């Protein structure tokens, strides 16, 4: 038996002994599941709040931009200028 095999065997025995002495708590699954559900709920609440904040900011910025538009008619809505019919310049 070489040095690597002996080291591996010693480690295997030590870890086997250590694992044999470990006992799970009776409510370990329930505790882990509760922690996971709390994290999941928190993640969903944070996501919902983030979506609401982004939607509100986008709405407020859009309203602010619309409010900054000039009140006098622009080039698009020039009611006093007549446009020649299509093909009249030929």
Image: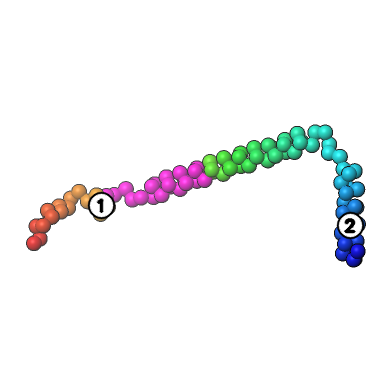
Looking at the image, residue 89 sits to the left or right of residue 25; the answer is left
Q: Which residues are drawn in magenta?
A: 54-73
Label 2 neighbour load within 10 Å: few <14, some 14-19, many 20+: few
Under tag 2, what secondary structure? Answer: helix
Q: Residue at x 68, y 40 (%)?
A: 39
Under tag 1, what secondary structure? Answer: loop
- Residue at label 1? 76
Name the main secondary structure of what is drawn in magenta: helix
Q: Nearer the viewer, residue 25 or 42?
A: 25
Screen quadrant of the N terminus: bottom right
Considering only vertical position in the picture, is 50 above or below 10?
above
The part of the image, by quadrant, that contains residue 6 is: bottom right
Looking at the image, residue 85 sits to the left or right of residue 61; the answer is left
Looking at the image, residue 66 sits to the left or right of residue 76; the answer is right
Considering only vertical position in the picture, is 87 above or below 67?
below
Q: Is label 1 in contact with label 2 (beta carbons under 8 Å)?
A: no
Gap in Å between the C-alphas at discs 1 and 2?
Answer: 86 Å
The part of the image, by quadrant, that contains residue 5 is: bottom right
Q: Is residue 18 magenta?
A: no
* Label ID, residue 4: none
Kindly report which numbered mark, 1 or 2, lies closer to the viewer in this rendering: 2
Screen quadrant of the C terminus: bottom left
Q: Residue at x 38, y 47 (%)?
A: 66
Q: Position of residue 89 (x, y in %)?
A: 10, 60
Label 1 neighbour load within 10 Å: few <14, some 14-19, many 20+: few
Q: What is the image's colouring?
A: rainbow
Q: Residue at x 50, y 46 (%)?
A: 57
- Residue at label 2? 9
Tell me which label, 1 or 2, sits earlier in the chain.
Answer: 2
Q: Is residue 69 magenta?
A: yes
């Amino acid at each position: 038996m070489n040095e690597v095999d002996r080291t591996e065997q010693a480690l295997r025995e030590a870890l086997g002994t250590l694992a044999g002495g470990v006992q799970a708590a009776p409510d370990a699954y329930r505790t882990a599941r509760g922690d996971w559900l709390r994290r999941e709920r928190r993640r969903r609440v944070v996501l919902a709040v983030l979506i609401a904040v982004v939607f509100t900011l986008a709405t407020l910025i859009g309203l602010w931009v619309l409010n900054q538009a000039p009140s006098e008619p622009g080039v698009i809505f020039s009611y006093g200028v007549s446009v020649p019919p299509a093909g009249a310049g030929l």
